[in-house]
């Protein structure tokens, strides 16, 4: 059985919701799945004032966790067209794993959330994917088998590079069922590839 890690940072809960959907998809393929979050680097008082969602149930990951999985699916919100500093700070600490080639051949993927439709979703996915490629991982996106990413009857996230959601400028929009289904599809697809490669 393949082991899959869903690793994420979520300031306001949108990425946390996507992470749970990605995990559902991976479990549906028969994988063993853990959801963990990266440490929050914003001081707690400032995070509270900023409305961060601080009651997230996922345990906090440590760098050493990463080599224990066959697949790692990384999610985080967009910050000016790139991954959040919290997520970048965590991945920046993985130099020892990179030096040892500890993540070579593992399966990877990315998912994200932005405030607006054109707020940098694809660029953010690529900023995550770039890190995973440097670690020697095999990348699996959200292929067009998930037709929901092509819908024109509603505003929706999703791209061939990974599952996404649109939070709205004030963060009030929650992931739609279509976006959650895209996250489940990507999680299932990545788990299926990991099972074929490592199962």
Image (cartoon, rainbow, N blue to C red):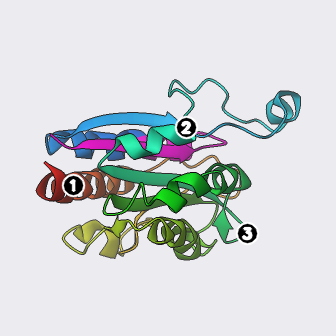
Closest to the camera, between mark 3 and mark 1, is 1
Question: Tag 1: Cα neighbours inside 10 Å, few (<14), some, or many (≥20)?
Answer: many
How far apart, in angstroms, are the residues tagged by discs 2 and 1? 21 Å
- As drawn, is 41 to the left or to the right of 31? right
Task: Residue under label 1, please give it.
Answer: 194
Pointer 3 or 1: first along the chain: 3
Whether tag 3 and tag 1 are in contact, CB under 8 A, the answer is no
**Image: 61 above or below 195:** above
- Is residue 99 positioned above or below 17 on the image? below
Res 31 → quadrant: top left
Q: Which residue is mark 2?
A: 37
The x, y position of residue 100, in whole percent, is 47, 57
Tell me the residue at 87%/28% (across/down): 45
Residue 17 in the magenta stretch? The answer is: yes
Secondary structure at numbered mark 1: helix
| Left or right for 66, reference 84 | left
Nearer-N-terminus badge (2/1): 2
The front one of 58 and 55 is: 58
Give the alpha-carbon distance from disc 2 to disc 3, as whole Å: 21 Å
What residue lies at 37% left-to-right and 62% top-to-bottom?
A: 104
**Residues in magenta, as a range:** 1-19
Q: Looking at the picture, does residue 60 appear above or below residue 123? A: above
Residue annotated with mark 3: 80
Secondary structure type for disc 3: loop
Determine if residue 149 is in view: yes
Residues at marks 3 and 1, CA–CA distance in whole angstroms: 32 Å
> Which sits earlier in the primary sequence, circle 2 or circle 3?
2
Label 2 Cα crowd, 10 Å radius (few <14 / some 14-19 / many 20+) = many
Residue at 61% over, 73% down? 120
Please state the horizontal and vertical placement of residue 96, each as a whole percent of the image: 57, 53
């Amino acid at each position: 059985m393949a082991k899959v890690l869903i690793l994420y940072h979520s300031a306001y809960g949108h990425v946390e919701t996507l992470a749970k959907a990605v995990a559902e998809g991976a479990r549906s393929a028969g994988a063993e799945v853990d959801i963990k979050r990266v440490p929050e680097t914003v001081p707690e008082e400032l995070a509270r004032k900023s409305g961060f969602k601080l009651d997230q149930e996922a345990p906090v990951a440590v760098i050493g966790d990463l080599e224990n999985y066959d697949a790692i699916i990384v999610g985080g919100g967009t910050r000016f067209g790139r991954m959040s500093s919290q997520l970048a700070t965590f991945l920046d600490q993985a130099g020892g794993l990179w030096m040892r080639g500890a993540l070579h051949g593992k399966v990877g993927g990315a998912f994200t959330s932005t405030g607006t439709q054109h707020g940098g979703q694809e660029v953010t996915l690529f900023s995550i994917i770039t890190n995973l490629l440097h670690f020697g991982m095999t990348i699996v996106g959200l292929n067009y088998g998930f037709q929901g990413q092509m819908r024109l009857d509603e505003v929706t996230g999703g791209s061939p590079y990974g599952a996404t959601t649109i939070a709205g400028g004030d963060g009030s929009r929650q992931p739609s069922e279509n976006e959650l289904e895209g996250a489940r599809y990507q999680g299932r697809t990545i788990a299926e590839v990991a099972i074929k490669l490592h199962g």
